Amino acid sequence: MFEKFKKSEILILVLVIALIFTSEYFYIVLKDPQRAIFIGLWPPTILGLLIFLNLKLKK
C-alpha cells in the first residue's frame, strides 16, 4: 500500500500526525488552548503545501 508514496511524503504525514497529537496534549494535559490552536493550524497548512507541490510536479 505504501509503495505509491515517496519517503518524503510518508515523513511529512508522520510529522502531521505528531503535530495533531502534540496539539491535543497541549489542550488536554497542559490546559493551554491558545498554544494548542496555534500548533493545530500547522497540519492543514503542511498538507496543503504537500498537495500543492504534488500537483505542480505532476504537470
Image (cartoon, rainbow, N blue to C red):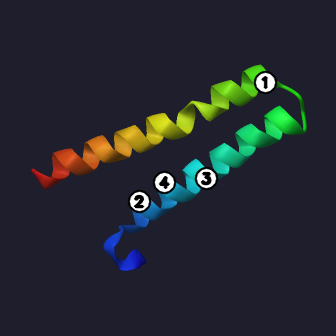
User: What residue sits 26% from the left and 51% below the top?
Assistant: 54
Structural crowding at the residue carrying mark 2, measured as other residues with C-alpha within 10 Å and reported as few (<14), some (14–19) or many (≥20): some
CB-based contact (under 8 Å), mark 3 and mark 2 = no
Q: CA distance from mark 2 to mark 1?
A: 29 Å
CB-based contact (under 8 Å), mark 4 and mark 2 = yes
Structural crowding at the residue carrying mark 1, measured as other residues with C-alpha within 10 Å and reported as few (<14), some (14–19) or many (≥20): some
At label 4, which amino acid type do we have? Ile
- Disc ID at residue 12: 4
- Disc ID at residue 9: 2
Q: CA distance from mark 1 to mark 3?
A: 18 Å
Q: CA distance from mark 1 to mark 4?
A: 24 Å
Comes first in the chain, label 2 or label 1: 2
Structural crowding at the residue carrying mark 4, measured as other residues with C-alpha within 10 Å and reported as few (<14), some (14–19) or many (≥20): some
- Quadrant housing the N terminus: bottom left
Structural crowding at the residue carrying mark 3, measured as other residues with C-alpha within 10 Å and reported as few (<14), some (14–19) or many (≥20): few
Q: CA distance from mark 3 to mark 2?
A: 12 Å
Identify the residue position indicated by label 3 in the image: 17
Above or below 19: residue 11: below
Identify the residue position indicated by label 1 in the image: 33
